[in-house]
Image (spheres, grey):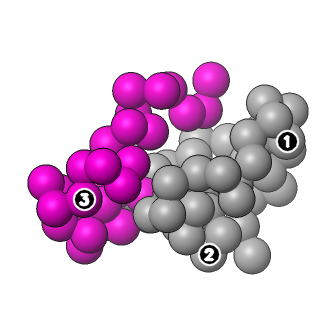
Amino acid sequence: MVFEEEAIRMFEPELAGEIPDEVLQALARDNANRLVAAFGSKAKVEQLLRNQHVAISKLPFALREAYLAILK
């Protein structure tokens, strides 16, 4: 699974203020970049997300922005 529930929770809005936005954004960008590196291409990551029915639009803000930026 690409996104484990526990990992996604750290990006949820109810934790706002506990983790600075800059840190969450950096972690989200790192996550997106590592997946692309691990799977070898942006196209493979996009396919993986589709296969797992992961809607980028439903991800927490930091993850959504990171994936939208990297998968352009």
- Amino acid type at mark 3: Ala
- Amino acid type at mark 2: Ala
Q: Earlier in the sequence, mark 1 or mark 3?
A: 3
The residue wearing badge 1 is 50
Magenta stretch: give its range: 1-29
Q: Nearer the viewer, residue 24 or 60?
A: 60
Q: Secondary structure at mark 1?
A: helix
Q: Which mark is residue 34?
A: none
Circle 2 packing at 10 Å, graded few (<14), some (14-19), many (20+), is few
The residue wearing badge 2 is 69
Residue 2 appearing in the image: yes
Residue 6 place in picture, x, y as percent: 38, 27
Q: Is residue 16 magenta?
A: yes
In the rendered structure, the answer to whether residue 45 lies left or right of residue 15 reads: right
The residue wearing badge 3 is 16
Q: Is residue 5 magenta?
A: yes
Q: Earlier in the sequence, mark 1 or mark 2?
A: 1
Q: Secondary structure at mark 2?
A: helix
Q: Nearer the viewer, residue 11 or 45?
A: 11
Measuring 49% from the left and 63% from the top, which residue is drawn there? Answer: 61
